[in-house]
Image (cartoon, grey):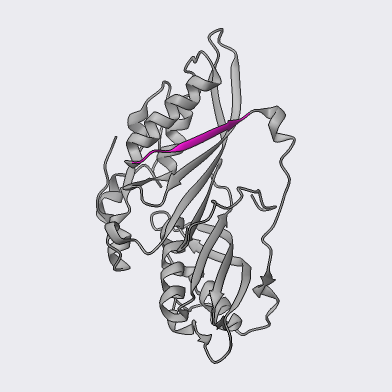
Amino acid sequence: MKDSSSRGALENAPLGKFSLNPEKYNPELLFPISRSVNRALLNLPNHTLPFVGVDIWNAYEISWLSTKGKPEIAIAQILVPADSKFIIESKSLKLYLNSLNNHRFVSQAEVKDTMTNDLSKATGSHISIQLSSPDEWLKLKFEGFGGKNLDRLDIEIDPNDIPNPYWLNSDASHAPVEESLFSNLLKSNCPVTGQPDWASIQINYVGAAISEEGLLRYLISFRNHQEFHEHCVEKIFCDIKKHCQPIKLSVYARYTRRGGLDINPYRADFNAPWPSNFRQARQ
C-alpha cells in the first residue's frame, strides 16, 4: 500500500488528479493517510486519545464478476475504528473498488474477505465490512437526527468566519442537562480539491447547558474550512470538550455522498454501541 505519513505526501495521492479506470484487481491502489498529522495539530497523541469512535463508510458502487462472468452488485458498510493508524484517501478507495469490477470471485463471502483483508492492511487495524444485496436495499429507509434543531435559530452570520472555539460556552450555574442538538448546515471543503463537503451533525452531551447560538455559529464557521471529514469531527469534539466541559459528549456527522461513497465519523468519550448507520435524505 502507498503510505502517506505527512500532509505534504498528499501531493502523491490520486485525489484531484486524472486517473485511468483500473482494469484488474489491485489493492496497491489504496492510499493510506496517517491520522497522527492532524491529531498533532489538536495536541492529541495517538496513545492517549480522549475519545473512542468509528468512521462509517458506505460504498454504493460495489461490483464484481461471478465465476461464470456474470456481474454482481452490493452496497458495502465499512467500519474503520477511530484508533486505526491510517485513514484511506477516498478517491483511492473508489479506484480500489473499481478494480474489483472485472475480477471473478467464487462468492460474495470471498469479496467481503478480500476487502476486509486489504482495507485492514491499509489502515493498520481490523476493519469490519458488511455487504448488502439488492433485495436488502428495499428495507432501507430515510431517517434524520433527533433532538433540538439548531437551524431554527435566526442569527446573523459573517460568511468569512473561520472556526473559533471561543464561541462555544456553557452555563454552569444550573444543574447539568442531557440533550441532543443537531444541525444540517455543516459544510467544510476538501483540503486537496477545495470542493465542498456537506453534512448533518448531532451533538449529544450531559453537562452544563451549551449555548445553542454559540454552537450553531461555531458549526457554520466550518463553511470555508479545509479539512477531511474525520479531522473536522475530531476538531469539533475537542473544541466542545475543552470550552464547554460536558461530563459526557458524542459528535456524529453524516456527510453526503461523493463518488459513490459517504463517510460518517462518530466520536464519544463514553462506552456505548456505535450509532445506527441510517441513511439521511441527502445521502
Q: Nearer the viewer, residue 6 or 203?
A: 203
Residue 198 placement (x, y as % from top left):
57, 59
Q: Residue furthest bottom?
A: 173
Q: Identify the residue at image location x=48%, y=43%.
A: 79
Q: Identify the residue at image location x=45%, y=54%.
A: 53
Q: Identify the residue at image location x=71%, y=41%.
A: 140
Residue 44 placement (x, y as % from top left):
30, 64
Quadrant occupied by the N terminus: top left
Q: Main secondary structure of the magenta part?
A: strand
Decide if residue 212 is on the left or right side of residue 90: right
Q: Is residue 131 magenta?
A: yes
Q: How many marks?
A: 0
Q: Nearer the viewer, residue 181 or 271?
A: 271
Residue 120 placement (x, y as % from top left):
37, 36
In the image, is residue 128 above or below residue 177? above
Q: Nearer the viewer, residue 43 or 30?
A: 43
Examine the rendering and report whether any part of residue 21 can be seen: no
Q: Quadrant of residue 139?
A: top right
Q: Quadrant of residue 43?
A: bottom left
In the image, is residue 271 above or below residue 218? above
Residue 181 placement (x, y as % from top left):
62, 71
Q: Identify the residue at image location x=71%, y=28%.
A: 135
Examine the rendering and report whether any part of residue 12 can be seen: yes
Q: Residue furthest top?
A: 68
Q: Quadrant of residue 187?
A: bottom right
Q: Which span is picked out in magenta?
A: 125-132
